Image (cartoon, rainbow, N blue to C red):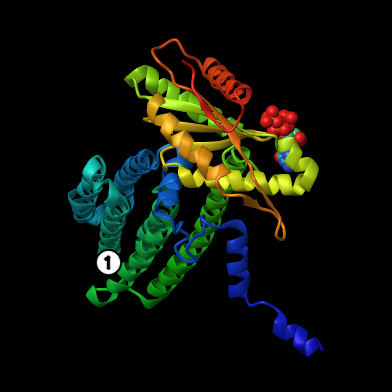
Amino acid sequence: MPEQKRQERPTVGRRWQRWLSRHFPAPYQIHPFTLRFRDAGIERAFIHGYDVNPVFLSRLALLSGLVIYSLFGFVDFMVMHDFHRELWSIRFGIGVPWILLGLALSLLPSLRPAYDWILLAVVQGVNATLVAMMVITQGAEGMLYLSGILLLLVYNFVAFRMRLWVATISAFLVIAGFLLAAPFGGYGNAFFMISGLFFLLFTTTALMFGATISELFARRHFVQSRLLDTQAKTDELTGLPNRRAFLQRLQAELARHRRYGAEFTLAMIDADHFKAINDRHGHEAGDRVLCEVGARLQRELRDSDMAARFGGEEFALLLSETSADRAITVCERIRQAICQRPIALNGSDKVELTISIGLATPAGDGHSVDSLLRQADDAMYQAKREGRNRVSAPD
Ligand SMILES: Nc1nc2c(ncn2[C@@H]2O[C@H](COP(=O)(O)OP(=O)(O)OP(=O)(O)O)[C@@H](O)[C@H]2O)c(=O)[nH]1
């Protein structure tokens, strides 16, 4: 029995997958290695949303790195007085222009998609200069430049805000660069080479671990706030947007109308004699009918339109770029889609449902969200008074 229990224990990989699927549900799944959202649109929203401006911050980091790198020229002078000219020609003749080139390229909007790779190139260039300076100084003094590479790794993982997988590739290229120097003159002694290599490996591991954790938590926080936001704007029963989301969209559409004269029509929909359905078939059946109404509304609309549950057995539609005349045709089609096909309940029971629809179309500037809602409501009650199961628009 204990044997069996041990076999059932999930592997680390399984647990990792489970943790990921719990915290990153569809459509927010992330790649288990790169940690990027699989959906390109979500990835873009995350990159633009979680930092004030990642490009601005990494440009600031480039600038501060440039200052620190240049200031170490004084240390060259004080500690390595004898051959500081050679060191300075590498630092100021190659390193500084290389960082400046990176900074200049970062200012070009057309290179924005390649920005991470520009940063990677800057890191590799600076690393090459530090390695060259280590080869020139040889031995214990070279420790100074090893510290420089460790600092470079901190910039690589933390300050430059590169995507984690690019930063990881960059860090391993830095280590490869350190090893590459061995055949070209080396560092004076094997002790320095081996201890330096271990320093670089352990620092990379620690920074990678820290960067992975903070990346994961930043992404989890992003997903949680998106889920909460969606929850706050979604009607639990039908899955349609709720009143709050609808009013936000209506406000935006009205602003577009005022600014550009964009046409749109608001429709309020109320199920007829819905109380009778609840009374005869029960509240649960009533819920099922509301869900089906929501699904049919959504099926009938264009992607650019919006259907929402406004409350109770009342729904609202926002038909963008739609005149009053065209809206009457659309709503007639919707009315028929509801009343011509009975709605199946549990078992073989079916109910027939009709709806009454009231329209409001803004004309000119004198409209507010409230006045439009009132107008559509009035039209809807007129449809009820005139016998229900119809579309009514104000004259
Ligand atoms: N099942 C269910 N019923 C709801 C829900 N919200 C509101 N209702 C019911 O919808 C009914 C609305 O009744 P009324 O306002 O009298 O309107 P009606 O019976 O549709 O009659 P008319 O609008 O005049 O055609 C009430 O019985 C509410 O309890 C809901 O989420 N689920």
Q: If the image is split into quadrants, where does the N terminus sit? A: bottom right
**Residue drawn at point x = 73 percent, y = 42 percent:** 277
**Residue drawn at point x = 58 percent, y = 68 percent:** 17
Residue 223 location in percent, x, y? 55, 49
* Amino acid, disc 1: Val
The quarter holding residue 382 reads top right
Horizontally, residue 6 falls left or right of residue 74, namely right
The answer to which of 194 and 233 lies nearer the viewer is 233
Residue 236 location in percent, x, y? 66, 44
Q: Taking 157 as reference, is 333 above or below it?
A: above
Q: Does the image show residue 4?
A: yes
Q: Which element type, helix, strand or loop, lies under badge 1?
A: helix
Displayed-image quarter of ligand 1: top right
Q: Does the image show residue 239?
A: no
Residue that lies at the very extreme toward the top in this rendered image = 366
Q: Taking 184 as reference, is 352 above or below it?
A: above
The answer to which of 200 and 316 lies nearer the viewer is 316
Q: Name the residue under label 1.
A: 135
Residue 166 location in percent, x, y? 37, 60
Q: Taking 237 as reference, is 157 above or below it?
A: below
**Residue drawn at point x = 46 percent, y = 47 percent:** 46
Q: Taking 113 as reference, is 124 above or below it?
A: below
Residue that lies at the very extreme toward the front in this rendered image = 387
Q: How crowded is mark 1: few (under 14 residues within 10 Å), some or many (20 or more)?
A: some
